[in-house]
Amino acid sequence: MKSASVTESDVSPRLGRAPDRSRAATRRRLKGAGTALFARRGLHGTTTAQIAHRAGVASGTFYLHFRDKHALFREIVFEALDALRDRLADASARAAADPVARVRERATELLAFADENRNLVRVLFGREHEAGELAEAVIDELVSGIEERLRGRIAAGAVPSGLHPAVAAQALAAMWARVVAWWLEDPRRAPREAVIETLVQIHPVYRAAVRR
């Protein structure tokens, strides 16, 4: 029986994809190694050579993927931020139409995510301020979503129209980041539920609901 022939067009796409798969795998190993080392040594205490060694690649290979360790850390952080956004969106959906319940679900999910990623939060928002401008960039990303939701709540009458959404969004993002970082330093400072409920009660949506 004649075997099926393999044409050049059959082979080329597979060969073309192999280097891409290898590059993607190396990048994943570098991110995994970086995440582990940043967690243990912090941003300042980690070198690109250490990351490459842990990932099982040559030191020079690191620079084929990332400009420096800060670029790697930034990618790790923003991938985590995307995951957090997805989880917060799911939390909002669970609360249906109740705006206060939505804030509570989001606060609950935020603390759970932060607890699971405590070392990342520590590097970003801890007292040593290792991440510098990157922490501010993360806050800015969070602010845009908070402001959009506040504008929607104002339009729906769930928040007083006198509240300036941009100002309130800046205050809420900075406050929540600081509270979460403070709590993660030592969770014995306050029960998780107390942290969640306090974050809810100082949110303008809750305060508006209480006044009604």
Image (cartoon, helix red, strand yellow):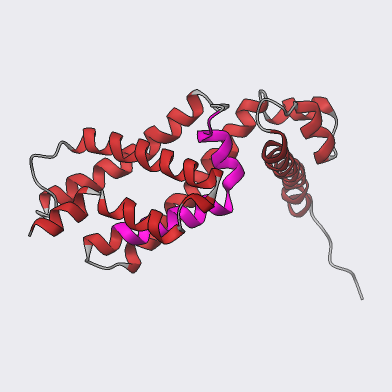
What percent of the width, then of the height, locates residue 105?
A: 36, 62
Tell me if residue 101 comes above or below residue 125 in the rendering. below
What percent of the width, then of the height, locates residue 98?
A: 22, 65
Number of labels in the image equals: 0
What percent of the width, then of the height, locates residue 117?
A: 58, 49
Relative placement, left or right, of 150 versus 127 is left
Residue 211 colored in magenta in the image: no
Relative placement, left or right, of 88 versus 170 is right
Which residue corresponds to the image point at 48% horizontal and 31% vertical from the top-left? 135
What percent of the width, then of the height, locates residue 190?
A: 45, 53
Tell me if residue 23 comes above or below residue 137 in the rendering. below
Residue most extreme to the front: 189
Residues drawn in magenta? 103-127
Which residue corresponds to the image point at 55% horizontal and 28% vertical from the top-left? 131
Relative placement, left or right, of 20 versus 180 is right
Which residue corresponds to the image point at 84% horizontal and 62% vertical from the top-left? 5
Asked which quadrant contains residue 53, the reply is top right
Pick the quarter of the image with the N terminus.
bottom right
Asked which quadrant contains residue 148, the reply is top left
Residue 111 colored in magenta in the image: yes
Asked which quadrant contains residue 174, the reply is top left
Out of 18 and 76, give the one closest to the viewer: 76
Q: Main secondary structure of the magenta part?
A: helix
Tell me if residue 204 comes above or below residue 37 in the rendering. below
Residue most extreme to the bottom: 1
Relative placement, left or right, of 212 versus 151 is left
Residue most extreme to the right: 1
Pick the quarter of the image with the C terminus.
bottom left
Which residue corresponds to the image point at 20% horizontal and 53% vertical from the top-left? 205
